[in-house]
Image (cartoon, helix red, strand yellow):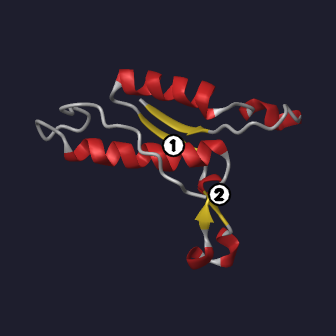
Amino acid sequence: MIITEMFWNPNGGQGYQDLWNAHTSGFGDAIRSCLDAQSNVSFQIGMVGDLFENLKSGLAKATFGTAEGAQAAWIWYHSYSEAEKMSTSGVPGRQKKRPSRPEVALR
């Protein structure tokens, strides 16, 4: 299964943006649990412009996005790469144990 985009950030339910009005502690963690339980799921959190800020100034000046969805993406992607290092059979997703979620300060 491939999920092409999902994103969230608390925003007070303003207009169209209410479609992604959520917190990582609720929606984000719930969706991650569902995706991890299914195992063979590829997903993208946000679009490139959501994950990075200042892109129009060039890659050298780009910074990590500050929205909750973007912050969670960088932490989750790191934990998945660590899990891959622990693969027992060479098959992605078959880890010896689930990695801990590192507390990475991205801002």
Give the amino acid type for the residue marked by disc 2 in the picture: Gly
Q: Residue at x 46, y 21 (%)?
A: 34
| Residue 20 x %, y % | 72, 34
Relative to 47, is 59 above or below? below
Give the class, few, some or many, for how many residues have Cα within 10 Å of label 2's Cα (few <14, many ≥20).
Answer: few
Q: Is mark 1 in CB contact (under 8 Å) with mark 2?
A: no
Q: Residue at x 85, y 33 (%)?
A: 12
Quarter of image, res 42? top left
Taking the image as shown, residue 55 lies to the left or right of residue 60, namely: right
The residue wearing badge 2 is 49
Label 1 to label 2, Cα distance in Å?
12 Å
Give the amino acid type for the residue marked by disc 1 in the picture: Gln
Taking the image as shown, residue 53 lies to the left or right of residue 16, namely: left
| Residue 63 x %, y % | 60, 66
Q: Which residue occupies the foreground of this view, 7 or 99?
A: 99
Quadrant (top left, top right, bottom left, bottom right) of the C terminus: bottom right
- In this view, the residue farthest toward the left is 89
- Kindly tell me whether residue 46 is visible in this rendering: no
Quarter of image, res 98? top left
Query: Total marks drawn?
Result: 2
The mark nearer the N terminus, 1 or 2, is 1
The residue wearing badge 1 is 44
